[in-house]
Every structure is written in C-alpha cells, then in structure tokens.
Image (cartoon, coloured by chain):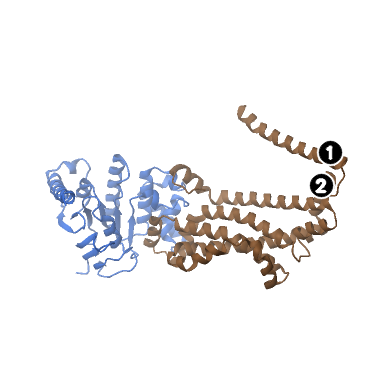
Chain colours: A blue, B brown
C-alpha cells in the first residue's frame, strides 16, 4: 500500500508528557486527493501539520511519504502558512520571493517558472513590488505562487484563508481548487471552516478536541468543478455539511464540559 | 513658504552661531596671544597642509589604512560569529559568559598588553581597533539572529536550505537592520581606538601628528589634526548611512506599514 502519498500511522506528540497534543492520529492520503482536516479550534492542527511536513518528529507512530520516513521536509512537499505577513521575506520582491525555492535551477528556466506561477495566481503586475506593499489576499497569492513554483506533489495549506476578508477567501478558494486540479496536486488543507472543508475536499478528516485523534473520515463525492453558488445549494452539500458540523460541535462541547 | 522658512531659520541660526564663536576665538587670539590660542588662519593653513603631499602620506593615509582594516575585521568577525551564536542557541551557555565579561573591558585598557604582545607595530594598532569595535557588531548580530521569525525559518527548511544557506539567505538579511545599528556604534569606537593607538610608540598617523605638534608647541597644527579627525568621522558616518539606506530600503517601508519593526 506504499502508493499512498501520505500515511499517518498512530502519530502521537506531546510537548509536555502529561498533556499530549496528538494522540494516535491515523489516516492516509492517496495521490491527487484533496484532503481537508477540520477540528475544534486549538485541537493541535498546526502541530499535526508540522509533523506531516517533517519539520517536527512525532513521539510515537510514523509519518510516511510514499512509504518512507523523512528527517527533514521531503523535496516534493511545500506549505502555505497561515500568517502571510510572517511567511514572506520582506527584503525580497514578489518575484524573488516566488523564486526562493528555485536556487538550483538555471536562470532561464527559473524566470519562466516564476512567470508561470505568478500568472497562475494572477500576480504578474505586482512582480516587482515588495510583500508589504500588497494587500493580504495578494500576499497570500504570492505565498501560494512560491509553493507551486517548485512543482510539489503534496501541498500543505495551514488555514491559508483564515486571515483574509470573506470575498477574498472565496476567490482564493476557487483559485486553489483550480490550480490543484490543473497540476493534479495532492493537497492537504487544515482549516476550522466547515463550509470550506466540505466545499473544497474529496475527503474530510474530523479531529477530536485535544488531544487530537481522528473521529471520522467523511468522503465528499460532490462533482467537480464545484461552484460557490450552485454546489453549496445542492442537498448533498447541505447534508455533508450538517454531518461534519454536528461532529465538530460535539467535540467542541466535550472540550468545554471536560 | 512656511516649510522653506522652517528649514532656513535653523540653518541661519547654526551658521550665525558658528560664525560668532569663531569671531570670539579670533578676537581672543589677537588681543590675548597665548600658545594654546592660535589665530584661525594658522589652523586653516595647518588643516589644508594635512590634506595633500607629505603630510597626507605620513598622517592621514596610515591612519585610514589601520582604521579600514581593523574596522572591517571587526564587522566581518562580529557578523559571522554573531549570526552563528544567535542562530545556534545551544552554543550560548558555552560562549555567553566570556562575551559578557570581555565586552566590559575598555579597549584602551588592553593597549599596554597589546603593545607587549605585538610590539609597536601596525598589527598592534589594528588589533586594538578591531577589539574595541567588534563587540557592538557581535552583540547586535546575536540579537538580530535571535529575532528572526520562526515562520521564515520553516519556509527555508521546507525549501531544503542547508544550515549555511539559512544563515546567509534568511538570518543575515533579517538581522541586518540591527547589525547596521551596531556597525554605526562600532565606527565611532574604531575612530577613538585609531587615535589612541597612534599616541603610543608611533612614528606616523594622525594621532602621532597631533602628539608631536603638541610637543613642538605647534598648537595650530594640533587643532588642525583634531579637525581632520572630525572630518573623517563625519565623512565615514555619512558613507555608512548612504550604504544603509540603499541596503535597507525594504526595511523602512516594511516597518512603516506593518508597525511591527524593530526598535531602531
């Protein structure tokens, strides 16, 4: 079964031994699959993401990329972080931020790929500006361009739309789905937004409150391409949304009563 | 109109003030002749003599060479060591106590020891200049390297940067605003140490020139040497600011907009 691009096998992580963050988290992701991980806020999603990216090693269990263990982030993995104003290099222009991961690529190919990535996120006109001269949505598009320019196989998104306004969020969701489909990327989206998870993903993994473990995996077989209006009005969407919402709320209530 | 007047008024005040002080000096020199009070034209003549010919070669050039080498060693060593120490925090307990002790030793105090160690040589003078000016750069670089945003370091790791690449492509640029603040302080210390090191067992340089003319009661030349050192300090500071402005142009914009910039 090593064709799975990502296997989480009983991953446990604790900063303090008495208060584990992740407890026996297991799921797998197939190539080309769009996976969304949702859970009550503060349940340890970011810790899980850092384990998945091999920026951090779990205490127990294994994170396997194509069946292999990695001590450092594998070369085909890239991340879009939540805080766009912290994840972009303020001393580099948009173009050079995007080119950051391409330092071993020849100049001609590098320029062409950066241009392609900027075009994909509709940011060609801002290539020579600095990140702090851009709006939040544009900064996050720049971070997205930097992540896809390295032609990753697995794209991790850490609540990438949480810090932008509602209209920008919708535009970014459509843009990300479009890019992932065109590049046949495997994408793992960590979010607390249930609508977003159901709307974008092929499969939703629901985490429990802290210590986080997998409560349920829910397949989302809504047809693609999906549309912000019509898809969200279908009975299937509303039914799935209801199910995920109920699960997350149960967890959140357990968290507050505990 | 008012904006222009706001600029002109202080400028006129400064010129008038300077002129008045010089006039008082000149009046005093003419009416109460004393060895410590030469007339202005002698000081100006001495100043101008310093900037060409033999005196340029025997006073200004040797001083500038020592200053340049000592200061550049301090900046380079301070940056490299500071970035490594700041980034690899595990090294801290090994190095910090020694650093905290050494930084409080005035460089002047090690001058006699340096003289014993290296003799009355350029090496001794360069060593003293570098020792005196390395600490502001070193401490600023340590501090700057510590403040690098953890998210940027994660981005670097995800993009597969090696330790050296992370130091030079992420930690160094992020620490540069603080490092420049340290370099400005280092420059003024380097200038002090340059003069002092030339007051002991020297046969050229600006410090030696001032000391010799004092012993010969050539007071006008003493003041001319002091003014020359002031000129050099001002010119170097302006050059440093110009470099800083072009290297850190991103920093002013970023700081102005995000409001989360450093404290400089």
Q: Earlier in the sequence, mark 2 or mark 1?
A: 1
In the image as oriented, which residue stretches furthest toward the top? B1
Asked if residue A184 lies left or right of residue A127, the reply is left
Q: Secondary structure at mark 2?
A: helix
Residue bearing mark 2 = B44
Q: Are marks 2 and 1 in contact (CB under 8 Å)?
A: no
Residue A28 place in picture, x, y as percent: 20, 62
Q: Which is in the foreground here, disc 2 or disc 1?
A: 1
Could you tell me if residue A16 is visible in this image?
Answer: yes
Badge 2 and badge 1 both on one subunit: yes
On the image, which quarter does residue B17 sit in? Answer: top right
Q: Secondary structure at mark 1?
A: helix
**Residue B182 or A156: which is nearer the viewer?**
B182
CA neighbours of label 2 inside 10 A, class few (<14), some (14 to 19), many (20+): some
Residue B14 place in picture, x, y as percent: 70, 36
Q: How many marks?
A: 2
Q: Residue at x 21, y 57 (%)?
A: A212
**Residue A144 or B38: which is nearer the viewer?**
B38
Residue A211 place in picture, x, y as percent: 21, 58
Residue B27 circle label: 1
CA neighbours of label 1 inside 10 A, class few (<14), some (14 to 19), many (20+): some
Q: Residue at x 47, y 61 (%)?
A: B86
Asked if residue A44 lies left or right of residue B22, the reply is left
Q: CA distance from mark 2 to mark 1?
A: 16 Å
Asked if residue B185 lies left or right of residue A117, the reply is right
- Callout 1: chain: B
Q: Residue at x 18, y 51 (%)?
A: A255
Residue B100 circle label: none
Could you tell me if residue A26 is visible in this image?
Answer: no
- Callout 2: chain: B
Residue A122 place in picture, x, y as percent: 37, 46
């Amino acid at each position: 079964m090593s064709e799975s691009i990502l296997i989480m096998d009983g991953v446990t992580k604790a900063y303090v031994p008495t208060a584990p963050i992740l407890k026996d988290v297991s799921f797998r992701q197939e190539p080309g699959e769009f996976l969304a991980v949702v859970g009550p806020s503060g349940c340890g999603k970011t810790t899980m993401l850092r384990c998945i990216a091999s920026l951090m090693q779990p205490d127990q269990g294994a994170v396997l990329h194509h069946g292999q263990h990695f001590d450092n982030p594998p070369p085909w993995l890239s991340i879009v972080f939540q805080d766009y104003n912290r994840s972009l290099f303020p001393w580099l222009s948009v173009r050079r931020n995007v080119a950051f991961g391409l330092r071993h690529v020849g100049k001609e190919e590098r320029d062409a790929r950066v241009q392609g990535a900027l075009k994909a996120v509709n940011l060609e006109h801002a290539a020579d500006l600095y990140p702090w001269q851009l709006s939040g949505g544009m900064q996050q598009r720049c971070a997205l361009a930097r992540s896809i320019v390295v032609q990753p196989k697995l794209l991790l998104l850490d609540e990438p739309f949480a810090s932008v306004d509602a209209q920008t969020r919708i535009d970014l969701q459509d843009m990300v789905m479009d890019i992932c489909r065109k590049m046949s990327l495997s994408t793992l989206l960590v979010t607390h937004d249930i609508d977003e998870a159901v709307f974008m993903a092929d499969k939703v993994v629901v985490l429990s409150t802290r210590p986080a473990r997998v409560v349920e995996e829910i397949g989302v077989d809504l047809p693609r391409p999906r549309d912000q209006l019509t898809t969200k009005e279908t009975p299937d969407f509303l039914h799935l949304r209801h199910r995920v919402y109920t699960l997350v709320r149960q967890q959140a209530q357990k968290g507050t009563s505990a | 109109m008012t904006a222009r007047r706001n600029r002109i008024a202080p400028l006129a005040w400064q010129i008038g003030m300077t002129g008045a002080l010089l006039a008082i000096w000149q009046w005093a020199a003419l009416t109460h002749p004393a060895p410590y009070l030469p007339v202005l034209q002698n000081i100006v003549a001495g100043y101008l003599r310093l900037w060409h010919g033999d005196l340029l070669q025997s006073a200004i050039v040797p001083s500038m060479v020592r200053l340049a080498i000592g200061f550049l060693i301090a900046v380079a060593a301070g940056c490299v060591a500071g970035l490594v120490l700041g980034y690899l925090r595990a090294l801290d307990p090994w190095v910090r106590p020694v650093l905290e002790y050494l930084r409080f030793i005035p460089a002047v105090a090690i001058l006699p020891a340096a003289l014993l160690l290296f003799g009355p040589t350029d090496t001794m003078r360069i060593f003293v200049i570098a020792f005196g000016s390395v600490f502001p750069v070193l401490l600023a670089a340590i501090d700057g390297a510590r403040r690098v945003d953890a998210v940027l370091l994660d981005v670097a790791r995800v993009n597969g940067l090696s330790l050296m690449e992370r130091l030079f492509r992420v930690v160094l640029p992020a620490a540069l605003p603080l490092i420049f603040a340290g370099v400005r302080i280092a420059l003024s210390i380097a200038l002090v140490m340059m003069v002092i090191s030339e007051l002991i067992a020297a046969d050229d340089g600006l410090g030696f020139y001032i000391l010799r003319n004092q012993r010969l009661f050539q007071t006008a030349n003493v003041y001319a040497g002091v003014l020359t050192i002031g000129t050099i300090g001002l010119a170097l500071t302006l050059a440093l600011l110009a470099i800083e402005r072009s290297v850190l142009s991103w920093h002013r914009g970023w700081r102005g907009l995000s409001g989360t910039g450093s404290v400089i």
